[in-house]
Amino acid sequence: MSNHSMLSLAAATLMALGVPAAVMAQTAEAKAAVDAGKAAGLVGEQADGFLGFVVPVADPALKSAVAEINAGRAAVYREAAARSGATPEAAGASAYINAVQPRLKPGQFYKPASGGWVRK
């Protein structure tokens, strides 16, 4: 499942909690850059619900894309937390466990809460 599909599922889950869809907005360019970064092993999913860099990256476009998507995720987590009474950190961790982790593709990287980057 693509990053976009994972975010769509996360958005549907969060919308069920009353989080507006507009908060999940991201540009097509950011999505494409992150998808390419994941395919190249540069970008991975973290247990906190955010994207991270598997290795140091110099590409400003990729850094900007990750920052854009992470900002959107942060807004969603804050909104979900406000509606549920949880913390934004708990909302991000829940999104990772329920929407992101189960859909990681073979070869993609993820970073569990317990340690370093792992390739699925």
Image (cartoon, grey):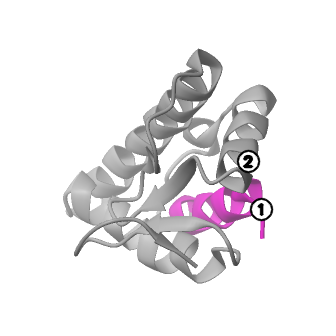
Q: Nearer the viewer, residue 76 or 44?
A: 44
In this picture, which residue range is highlighted in magenta? 1-15
> Residue 39 occupies which quadrant of the picture?
bottom right
Q: CA distance from mark 2 to mark 1?
A: 8 Å
Q: Which badge, 2 or 1, comes first in the chain's sequence?
A: 1
Q: Secondary structure at mark 2?
A: helix
Left or right, 65 with respect to 28, comes to left
Residue holding disc 2: 35
> Please, what is the three-letter code of the amino acid marked with disc 2?
Asp
How many badges with numbers are in the image? 2
Left or right, 27 with respect to 43, comes to right
Q: Quadrant of the C terminus?
A: bottom right
Whether tag 2 and tag 1 are in contact, CB under 8 A, the answer is yes
Residue farthest toward the top in the current orientation of the protein: 60
Residue 71, x across and y down, in percent = 44, 33
Residue 89 against residue 99 in the figure, above or below: above
Q: Is any atom of residue 18 visible in this view?
A: no
Identify the residue at horizontal 62%, vertical 36% (top origin).
Answer: 22
